[in-house]
Amino acid sequence: MNKNLKFHLLPLILICGLLFEGCQTLKMPAGPDVSSLPHIQNAPTIGIQVIDSRSSERIGTIGAASLYVKANEIIPPTQNYLIHFLYEQGINAVVMPQSVNLPDLNLDGLINMDVKNINVSSFDLLMDEPEYISTALVTLTDQKGQTLFKGQVQGNDRSRAISVKGTGIIIGKTINNAIMHLSISNEFMKAIKNLKH
């Protein structure tokens, strides 16, 4: 290896070694600011529910470090990504509690997004760029509780981010990517169109 390159890489290798030892609990970004989105007139309004049914908060390893993401870090930004996505499809969305009786509500439908898995694996941060993968099950029902769509979505991204915040941002991107994949699902888009009638 070139001596100059080796000289410049050594501090980075040492930093990565120090950061990726033991375990890290990652911090998720808040996601898009949906608080100021105006109500779309003459458009359907649906409720959204996001749950985290992962079997463990541990998402994998990078080098010798185990990485963790808590449920309370996953749910709020996922709600914001989903609301923002639906708004771009011409749908108003409101966050609903888990125990609701849909027919009693003045809503046109309900989306349940169940985060099933978040995973990352890399034997070495520099030599093996980590790939982050998020998987969720999305179910859309109409106001009568009839299922219009049910399917799995997945998003992925690669990054050598080494900070707690940086790696959290990458996970946020994979969740958003998974949601965006709904826009290329003919079945989902057809179900959304039916809500508008």
Image (cartoon, grey):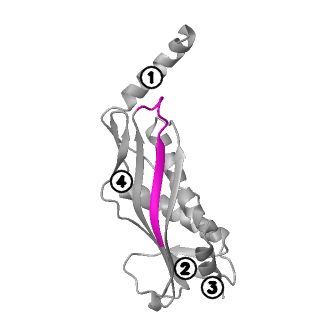
User: Along the polypeptide, which appears first: circle 1 or circle 2?
Assistant: 1
In-front residue for pair 48/63: 63
User: Along the polypeptide, which appears first: circle 2 or circle 3?
Assistant: 2
CB within 8 Å, label 1 to label 2: no
- What label sits on residue 28 in the rendered view? none
Which residue is disc 4 drawn over? 70
Q: What type is the residue that disc 4 sits on?
A: Lys
Where does the C terminus fall, quadrant-wise? bottom right
Q: Residues within 10 Å of mark 2 (few under 14, many from 20)?
A: many
Which residue is disc 1 drawn over? 13
Q: Residue at x 48, y 44 (%)?
A: 131
Select label 1 or label 2 by which is in front. Answer: 1
Task: Give the left or right position of residue 44, taking residue 53 as reference.
Answer: right
Q: Secondary structure at mark 1?
A: helix
Q: Is residue 3 above or below residue 68?
A: above
User: Along the polypeptide, which appears first: circle 3 or circle 1?
Assistant: 1
Q: Residue at x 43, y 47 (%)?
A: 27
Q: Is residue 85 above or below residue 93?
A: above
Q: Is residue 89 visible?
A: yes
Q: Secondary structure at mark 3?
A: helix
CB within 8 Å, label 2 to label 4: no
Residue 131 on the magenta span: yes
Which residue is disc 2 drawn over? 46
Instruction: Tell me the distance, in whole angstroms, between the alpha carbons under discs 3 and 1.
Output: 54 Å
Select label 1 or label 4 by which is in front. Answer: 1
Q: What type is the residue that disc 1 sits on?
A: Ile
- What label sits on residue 194 in the rendered view? 3
Q: Is residue 37 visible?
A: no
* Residue at the extreme right: 41
User: Along the polypeptide, which appears first: circle 1 or circle 4?
Assistant: 1
- State the extent of the magenta-drawn residues as a range: 124-138
